[in-house]
Every structure is written in C-alpha cells, then in structure tokens.
Image: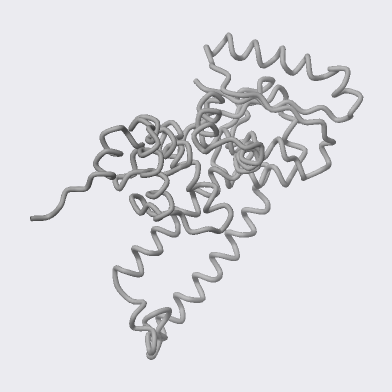
Amino acid sequence: MKIIPYYRVSTKKQGRSGLGLEAQKADVEVFVRQHDATIVAEYREVETGKKSNRPKLNEAIGHAKLAKATLVVAKLDRLARNVAFTSALMESGVDFVACDNPNANRLTIHILAAVAEDEAMRISRRTKDALAAAKARGVKLGSAQPGHWDGKEHLRGWKKAAKASARARTERAKDAYAFLIPKMRELRGEGRTCGEIAEWLSEQGHQTTAGKPFNAATVCRIMQRADGVKPTKWGKLPASVLSRMQGMRASGSTLEEIAGWLNDHGHATAAGNQWSANSVYRKLNPRRKE
C-alpha cells in the first residue's frame, strides 16, 4: 500500500515548534506499521482550517493521483472542516484515510457534500424530464435539429471524435502533472537539462500517467504543453540540431556522447524512444535509396 501523508498545523508558532505536527506524525507511523504501508512522500502545511487556499494540499492530492497512492491524514478534522477541500477531493478521485477514523473515507466525504449534491441531482432531473417531455412532443434536440450541421459538415465523423479524444487525453495529462510544473520550471531555471529533471523526478518516486519512469523527452513535452508551445514531433529534428550532431561527430565526440546530449535536451527518436549509439549512427548515415 502506497501512502502520502498530509500534515497541517493551524499557526506558524505550531509549525516552528512542532506542536501538533509530532502527534500527527506519530499517528501516521502507527498506521504505517499496522498496514505495512510505504510512504511515497510527505507534505506539511501551516494554514488555518478556514482558508481554502492550501497549495501543499493541492500538491499532495496531485502526487497521490499520479502515484496511485492513498492520501493519509492523522485526524479527520484536518480536512473535513474545509468545504472547498471536500469538493476538490471528490472531483480528484483520490482515496484517503484518516488515522483516527479509518472508516472515514471517500464515502464519508460524499456524505459531507450530500446536500449540495442532492440539489445538483434535482436540477439535473428536472432538466432531463423537460427534455424528455419536449422529445415526446416531437421536438428535435441537439444535432438532430434541422439545419444544425449546415455549414459545419466538415466537423462530422470520426476525425472530429479522434481530435476530441486527443485533446481530452492532453488535458488529463496536463491536470495530472500540474503540481509538478512549478518544480520542473525551477530546476530548468537553474540550468538543469530535461534529462537531469527526469532523473530528479524518478528519484522522488514520480511516474508518468502510464506508470513508467520519466525520460528527457517526456519532461520536455510536458513543459512545452504547460507553456502553450506545440510539442516537437518525434523524429522531426530541427536542422540546427542535426547540424550540431554533425559538428560534434566531426570534433571527435563518440556516438554515445551525441546520444546522451540528445536525450538530455529532450529529443526523441521517430518511435519516441531514447537515442542510442545505433540510432545516432543511422541518423548521421541514412541509407541512400537505389
């Protein structure tokens, strides 16, 4: 069982002295022993329970979601006082456990938000009933309405669905990696290469949405999307990069060194893999067609 503990103390004085924090850590340690759990990472926040802006809590939720881990708190009141968190946790789909009440899980959180959810369900039911009544009277709804596709015929069919699916996957990935972007940008600002950032992410126990270790190409694509830049297509090396490869080879660099440089700077092969000495050789010595 993988867990991510979240500790919160209400005042800066408590945060400095450790009052309250030590008790929470002790409760989590007991939970770890009882359930043979593995701590992936820990998050600590000094914030009053009345505030809804909790950056460390958002990071903990994002990390738990990406690592498929359980969010653990020492006491239920560390979370349950905050209505904004209740909504965020329900939408994130992350499992959580409170050490002082192991039975207080997502179902308990669901109950806390029951009134708001019941109201939303009633509105939805009324809307569906109204649409059903209109359909029964012969009213055409949605894309079945006459003239709905006039001038928009090019949007129909599988191509539109494929593009929509791709956009949805991209948005899910952006949401999953959102809590990592600030740290990745910080490391990039320090002069770290994409390869070094990938190594740091792996050392911290982070994985991609596919459950695989990060590599330089993945890191660069994530940062490009976060910056609103269209990611470079695999295998489409800019002329300047190919020229750099040729220059490095001419100056005596080995194929392994060139491959390392490409990987560190986030360039991938046409198949989306890391560069190797063989793939560099094939790129620099393409076969001539007879």
Position in image of residue 181 (x %, y %): 61, 43
Q: Is residue 93 above or below residue 233?
A: above
- The quadrant of the picture occupied by the C terminus is bottom left
Q: Is residue 9 above or below residue 53?
A: above
Position in image of residue 82 (x %, y %): 76, 41
Which is nearer the eye, 93 or 139? 93
The furthest residue to the right: 13
Position of 150 with respect to 289 (left or right) is right
Position of 209 with respect to 24 (left or right) is left
Position of 16 with respect to 76 (left or right) is right
The furthest residue to the front: 251
In this picture the colour scheme is one colour
Is residue 110 something one can see in this rendering? no
Residue occupying the point 50% across, 54% down = 171
Is residue 47 something one can see in this rendering? yes
Position in image of residue 33 (x %, y %): 58, 9
Residue occupying the point 59% across, 45% down = 178
Total numbered labels placed on residues in the image: 0
Residue occupying the point 59% across, 13% down = 32
Which is nearer the eye, 260 or 80? 260
Residue occupying the point 89% across, 28% down = 12
The picture quadrant where one finds residue 154 is bottom left
Position in image of residue 196 (x %, y %): 53, 31
The picture quadrant where one finds residue 284 is top left
Position of 258 with respect to 50 (left or right) is left
